[in-house]
Image (cartoon, grey):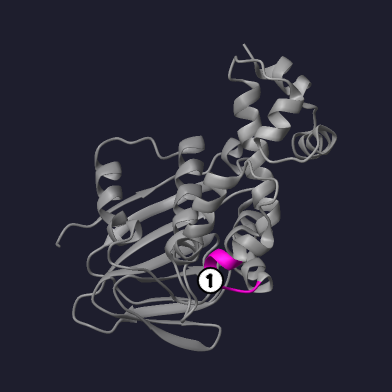
Amino acid sequence: MNISYGRHFITTERDRGLPLHLGSVGLMTHQGSIYREHGYHAFHWLHTVEGVGEFSVNGTTVKLYPNQGILLKPNVSHSYRAETSIWSTWFMTFDGALANPITASLDLQHMRPLSWGSDSPLAAIHLQYDHKCNHSFDLAGVNGSLEVYAFLTLIKQFGQAGNEPSLSEGHERLAPIYLLIEEAYGNPDLGLERMANTLRVSPQYLNLLFRKSWGISPYQYLLQFRIQKSKDMLLSGRCPTVKEIAASVGFQSDSHFVHTFRRVTGMTPMQFRAQYGE
């Protein structure tokens, strides 16, 4: 690896109103020493592609090995330098009207090293952006906002701090439940007990696993799955009745189905069909 690249974007007044906007992105094949007493003015991501670097923030010094990175909040004092003769890094900086709440809602770790597997998309993202930066991809404005959000979701999905499992590992653990729900969502007797038995865990522990991966309980996930299936039926063109749909997706009564549908979507099943059907 001997080619660096980088793109920096001028922030306009219009960009400042975007939920996120991309400030810069690039690859440094020979990362130099950096000391920022007052931090960087925007969110700053840095990870190691090759070699080893030493990163200091909040009075703690850590080493960043390949497939390890760190996300810094704006204006946080930090410094970093190479530990090996070659230290190659990839960076992204961003800000935006909703940068703080978005990173908070994704529950991203700040100022702590995150790691990911060599087969995850994060391991090759510097190659993807080499292509984007050198082939006239439009990375400013709304397009840049989408790029930042897509990258943050990759950190959420594949990054892990310490010995905590990554989000993707959590989903792998729950795969048998997803399959069970797909096959048995129409059974009104499908509930927490059966789902927990499928994984051979307690209902309490299954609740914990789901909340870590989705932020909701298994029962809430099942209800949302059933409502999504009912939407497909409402728009299928076969014109089944509300009572038939309720029974098909596992509700014991059409009144419970209508109440749940309205709570989730803000409208009744018939209103949904009238608004979105052909």
Residue on which disc 1 sits: 39
Towards the viewer: 242 or 53? 242
Residue 107 visible in the snapshot: no
Residue 35, percent from left and from top: 43, 77
Is 71 included in the stretch rendered in magenta? no
Is 198 included in the stretch rendered in magenta? yes
Residue 58, percent from left and from top: 56, 83
Residue 67 visible in the snapshot: yes
Segment tinted magenta in the rendering:
197-202
Mark 1 falls on what kind of element? loop
* Quadrant, the N terminus: bottom left
Towards the viewer: 54 or 188? 188
Q: Is residue 198 left or right of residue 127?
A: right
* Kind of residue indicated by mark 1: Gly
Q: Is residue 232 above or below residue 59?
A: above
Residue 72, percent from left and from top: 52, 69
